Structures are given as structure tokens and as C-alpha cells.
Amino acid sequence: MFKKGGNFSRLMASEAILVQNLTRKFKELVAVDNISFSVHQGELFGLLGPNGAGKTTTINVLATLLEPTSGNAAVAGFDVAKSQGDVRKHIGIVFQEPALDTKLTGRENLEFHAMMYKIPKVERKRRIADVLSLVELTDKADVLVENYSGGMKRRLEIARGLIHEPAVLFLDEPTLGLDSQTRRLIWDYIKKLNKERGVTIILTTHYMEEADFLCDRVAIIDHGKIVVLDTPAKLKDALGGDVVCLEVNDEQETLLNRMRSLEWIKAAKHYNGCNLSLTMEKAETRIPEIVSIAEQDKAKITSVSIRKPSLEDAFLHFTGRTIREQEASQDDKNRRVLRMRMRRW
């Protein structure tokens, strides 16, 4: 984590992205709340959080699409508030919403984008061939984009974001709305791009598996604040052991309270997919004792499973709720705001 109060001007040249005490407000709404972090050169960095957490707003500030309310941010060594033109020359961005011209071919979309960056004609041809090959769309280059699948469109957007050879690539929910098979293919392209081309990538996502598979480091962001930042492995290790999932009939709350009283259980709570989720070290040796305690409390355990912690477990550990619960809460808030507006009309 970037240390608050550090010399911003001195550090901005050494990091691909540097953010210091960044805040972005929309009137009374604080969308990004005093966050600080850095992204190293060549790193694949993730902002993980529910819808409405502030991920896209952060990306938009870094990409100079929004001005910061306060704080500092630099991308590729340039201040986002003072050197917007320089920042834009050094970044590529793939937006959450599709931004392709479906009445043009894939090649024509890339040609138009390259011309916008004033890339000479001979160089344009080379780069277009290069990025089409990278995302494996060479054989579809002259097909109208309206005939592309969702995955092909996403790959073309990634290719377009690379046409001017940016130092930093922003991917805002890069696999949103894609099926699981296509999502995995896009992950492979992103990994390949980062490892083989050395492009620094910062992506936003609310998919746990995506952040876990792709990212060197992950910042969990919630209600505009960065809750914790570390590698996926260390975030999962923070739970302190294995996760035991119990399916329990009768006396669930009694057993839950009993489990919470035991020193060797690090965490005990209700969780999606099982009645009781318990975190502990050497779980396999503790199962007989758990069963014995359940019998004493007249709680009937119908199934037991043991697994290693997931990034979703880590999210729950650090925020107190699952990402689905966070999004449901945000949806409720959005509906309340909509009802208020409708009453005013």
C-alpha cells in the first residue's frame, strides 16, 4: 500500500499508477473516499468490489474522464489533473459498456481508432495485424462487428485498446455478461497480454474467481474505501485456516453460539451454501469434536465439507458481508432513490 503523506512528485515517476488520498464526490455522494494505492510497472492489479463500490469512478478519474474532488493521482508518470493529454497518450481503456461501431468490420474499427491516435499508415497496418493476431481475430477481421459473438466483441475492444501501444491498460469489468467458457478465454488473453507484452493492467471486477486467477494484487473496495490490499494468496491466508461447511437441522443458532465460544475456531457464521461456516486450523482433526458438540446441543449435522479459503471468504472476512449481499443492499438503495424521484415528479 502506498504510504499516505509520501512525496507524491518523487514517487509518481517510479510507479505505473500512483494514487494519494483520492476523493471523488457527486454533490453529497462520496463515490471514492480518500483512497491511496500504487500499481507497479508490469503489474496486473485488481479493484474488487460490488456494484456501486467506487471501482468505475476510480478508473474514470485515472483515465482523466472525471476530475478528482481532492487528492492526487498519476498514471505513467503524469498527473491526471495537470497533464491529461499526456495521460491519454499512454493509456488504453476498455469500457464496461460496448463502444464498437457494429456497422464496420473489425479491421475498420481498429483502423479508425489508430487514425484517431495519428499513427502513420504503414505503422497502422503493422499494429492492426499485430493486435488482431494477439486476440486471435485475424480470420474475422473483415467481418462486420454486428455478426461477432459477445466474446469476439470483447476481444476486439481489447485489441483496440492496445493499438497505440499504451503503457497502462484499464479494463472495466472486462468479462461482464459473458458466459463462463468465454470468460475463461478472455482471462487467458489478459494474462498473455500482461506477461508477454509487459503491459500494466488495472481491472475492475466483482467476480471473485476473476480477481483470484488474474491479479498479482487485489484491493477490496467497498463504499468508496479500500478495505484491504494484498495478493490473493495473502488475503485468503488472513482467515487463518481451513473452512468447514456444516449442513445442520435443528438448533442451528445454539450450535453457532457454541462454536463461537471455542478458542480454536477463528470464525463462525452463516454463509451462502451452508448453514454454518467455521474457520479453523487442521480442520480434519477437529471434525469428531464438532460432531460431539453438536450431539450435546441436539443439533443434527447432515453433511460436512472441508475446503481451503476462497477470495469470497476473504471478502466476507474483511467487509462482514458477501459481495452478493453488498450488491443487494446497493440495489435496495437504488430502488429507494428511484421511488423518491418518482414521488417528486
Image (cartoon, rainbow, N blue to C red):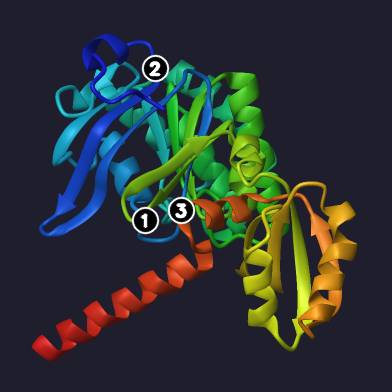
**Residue 61 in the figure: left or right of residue 246:** left
**Label 3 crowding class (10 Å Cα cut-off): few <14, some 14-19, many 20+?**
many
Q: Nearer the viewer, residue 18 or 320?
A: 320
**Residue 169 in the figure: left or right of residue 285:** left
Q: Give the quarter of the figure containing the N terminus.
A: top left
Q: Return the mark for residue 15.
A: 2
**Label 2 crowding class (10 Å Cα cut-off): few <14, some 14-19, many 20+?**
some
Q: Nearer the viewer, residue 153 or 282?
A: 282
**Residue at disc 3, secondary structure:** loop
* Marks 2/3: CA–CA distance: 23 Å
- Amino acid type of the residue that numbered disc 3 sits on in the rendered structure: Gly
**Residue 326 in the figure: left or right of residue 239:** left
- Amino acid type of the residue that numbered disc 1 sits on in the rendered structure: Ala
Q: Give the quarter of the figure containing the C terminus.
A: bottom left
Residue 69, image x, y percentages: 13, 41
Residue 95, image x, y percentages: 41, 48
- Label 1, on which residue? 53
Upstream in sequence: badge 2 or badge 3: 2
Q: Nearer the viewer, residue 19 or 192?
A: 19
Q: Is any part of residue 51 visible from this angle?
A: yes
| Residue at 52% over, 23% down | 199
- Amino acid type of the residue that numbered disc 2 sits on in the rendered structure: Glu
Q: Return the mark for residue 49.
A: 3
| Residue at 86% over, 71% down | 291
Q: Quadrant of residue 65?
A: top left
